Image (cartoon, rainbow, N blue to C red):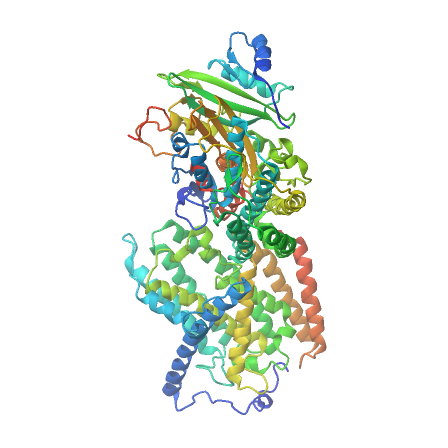
Amino acid sequence: MALKTEPFALNIGPAHPSTHGVFRMRATLDGEVIVDVEPVFGYLHRGVEKLAEQRTYTGFIPLTDRLDYLASMSNNMAYCLAVEKLAGIKVPERAQYLRVILSELQRIASHLIAVGGFLNDCGAFMTPILYMLREREKILDLFEMASGQRLTYNFMRIGGVSQDVPEEFMPALGKFMAQMPRFIDEYEQLLKENEILIARSKGVGILPKDLAINSGASGPVLRGSGVKWDIRKADPYAIYDRFQFDIPTGIMGDSYDRYRVRVEEMRQSLRIIKQAMEQIPAGPVRAEVHHLVHPPIGEVYARIEAPKGELGFYIVSDNSIAPYRLHIRAPSLINLTALREMIIGWKIADAIIIFGSIDICMAEVDR
Amino acid sequence: MARANFNVISQISPLTLPPDWPGGFWWHFLVFTIIIIAFVMSMVIGFMYFERRAIARMQARLGPNRVGPFGTLQPIADAIKVLLKEDIIPTKADKIVYWLAPVVAFSPVLMIFAVIPFQNGALLADLNIGILYVTAVASLTTVGIFMAGWSSSNKYSILGAMRDIAAVVSYEIPLVLAIAGVVLISGSLSLNQIVLTQDIPFILLQPLGLFLFFFAACAEINRSPFDLLEADSEIVAGFHTEYSGMKFAMFYLVEYAEAVAMSAIITTLFLGGWRGPWLPPWLWFIVKTGAVFFVMVWVRTTLPRARIDQLMAFAWKFLFPLAVINLVITGVEILIFPVALPWGIVLVNIGIAGFLILLWSRFFQIGWGRVEV
Amino acid sequence: MTIALPGKEIADKLAGKFPGTIIDSNPGWFTVKSESLIPVATFLKEAPEYDFKYLTYVTAVDYFDHFEVVYQLTSLECNHSVVLKTTCPRDNPVLPSVVGLWRTADYQEREIYDLMGIRFEGHPNMRRIVLWEGFPGHPLRKDFNGT
């Protein structure tokens, strides 16, 4: 006699200790298995795209910080690249190198939180995330030396960076670079072959390659599914074509692959920073640009490889001091498109892990 | 020595207490009730503080160090805070069951300590079915937890309570089979006699049994890596989501008191209880219990959490066959050496335990993955 | 480098295949009529020399008398991209949905409906996404002033 069961609806979020930000999943459960899930968001919508039409180009830079607040330098850089492409402004060499160094440091900091949060969701009781935060503190100290801020830096400007870094920045960066590879190895040692972690995340939440491409995934989510697409190599911006680095890809597209891709990317970022530190010239750090930029009439789309994926800005300009229309291609929102396929069939505990392995920031999803 | 001449054994410790010390049944009952309650409360407070400091040091931070010298008054500050909190009862909760649940959960834990010896003969009641009584009473806590989950009328609580029942029922069997191995060697169910027969501590004679018992105990008391019942990151707080104030404190106390109880039982069964040179026996007991608890804390800080189906698979497919094999091997050893197990058997046992665990883990598949919907 | 294919070139090729669909073309983009959006998009996705299997973004711009919806298509294999636009009038903003071709458009078209008011036919779940149900108006329109 088959047991008659009835599915019931459960609300995971929005105020939940483990959804990264205010995110709500309306799940229909059959016992513990999720048979349907509907993501609901919009709790953090601030109308950034509308605000852009009422601010000058330079005045919008602080708002880009608050998009993915864990990777502010990358957001700043994407926006400044877009405006510079539109207005035809050339950035001095030293500023380019500084931008690359800061972006890669930001990538390491963001991935530290992503990996730590993922392990926290697996239930490792905060130990991994506390170790990673210890390293992130060193990166935040470097950022504080450069810009005076720990989280939302507002450091890049249209035409370069806002000011040069102080003299103690480069020695401190060298010291950090000497210690960091050892720490990544230390974390790997505890976690890479951990039985429970592998059991919780290997084969869990598989995103097949075709679905990943069709649903527009980007960043570690796309690379974890086996697609070798990194904008720094495929469509190099700033001066990324001068550096040598590899692109780690996964095999299966499960949560474990995405976690490994992020850890390997941290190592590659260290390589890039090392090469940039050797090649950086002296010189001005900011082009002579009036603070009220008047780009010519036209439109542009510029994109970077942010830690969460492909972050792009689409700007339409009508030769006034404010953009006519600004659209932000948010990687976190588009990576969530295939969430339903990834979660259905697994249990609640896995849903949290799968969601954590996509690594989103709600401020970017809702803008 | 195994199951041998008890007249000889009783001479090893001069401080054998008669069963109705100090003067008659009721005085004995009163004195020991006070001792047990004082012991449990002080050990719980001490262990809470110890766990927070130990976890903090393992996570590269300091832990509580403000309240009192070295933060030792922190648990007392927590207790005062929790007592002063408002007691919120959800309107749709089943009031009587909701009120009774913490009581039903906590009482059995205190009752376990009635048969654990602090010294030779120093226990509330030297039942000759000691360890059987312990396993029976320890299961009653689950009833209290299910009452809590059910009466809260909250979906998360019911989920947590169901998970708890499944876990506890599954892990009873390896637990009891591991105990059966110890009982075979010592020849008696009474905890006092089990300690007295441990000339070779049973951790050396039954390493596989200790491995099984440790993990089964972790699952019974909902500690990592099996703390999915109150997994913060999944179902908010499981069965005690809707509890606040003193009732929540009772559940918190239940968790730590059970940890103390299981550590005490492991000490008694496997580590030789109160036996040891130089120090007074009750101090040895406390030190050994603390050491077992430290291992529990260590495991909690390091390992991630298992999922419910992985938990069940671990109990039924990994621990249960190993427990049966352990029992068979122990029985064979007793047949070969009926009087006393020599020291040489220790190496044989450790070798067999290591080999079996490695062999089983090669073929063991955790969980069953994705369900087609 | 990702080659941005010039709009004029593709527009000329398409004018041969789908006559009467091209409204406008430009080195940066080309514009098609809304009725022929799906056939053109399908052709661009399936044709082996284009292979635009990756939709980078969908967004909408308000030009006072009409709306323009912008699609950027990328091919990961051939590493080239193109910008495709289509228009719809302001008083009846309805367009066919490309969700059947690229799942990426799922949330992005809902967002355009929410903030700009353009309905997409054929979308399985045409509801507001960032604002709540019952929000009056569509904020990103140029005539929305916070009321």
Tally of numbered discs: 0
In this picture, residue B259 sits left or right of residue B214: left
In-front residue for pair C137/A76: A76
Q: Is residue A69 above or below residue B101?
A: above
Q: Residue at x 43, y 73 (%)?
A: B72
Q: Determine which quarter of the picture holds residue C26.
A: top right
Q: Residue at x 52, y 27 (%)?
A: A87
In this picture, residue B68 sits left or right of residue A185: left
Q: Position of residue B83 (x, y in %)?
A: 32, 67
Q: Is residue B359 visible?
A: yes
Q: Position of residue C14 (x, y in %)?
A: 57, 12
In this picture, residue B146 sits left or right of residue B354: left
Quadrant position of the N terminus of chain B in the picture: bottom right
In-front residue for pair A70/B8: A70
Q: Is residue B185 above or below residue B212?
A: below
Q: Determine which quarter of the picture holds residue B109.
A: bottom left
In this picture, residue B162 sits left or right of residue B173: left
Q: Position of residue B317 (x, y in %)?
A: 60, 56
Q: Position of residue B87 (x, y in %)?
A: 29, 61
Q: Is residue A253 visible?
A: no
Q: Is residue B275 above or below residue C99?
A: below
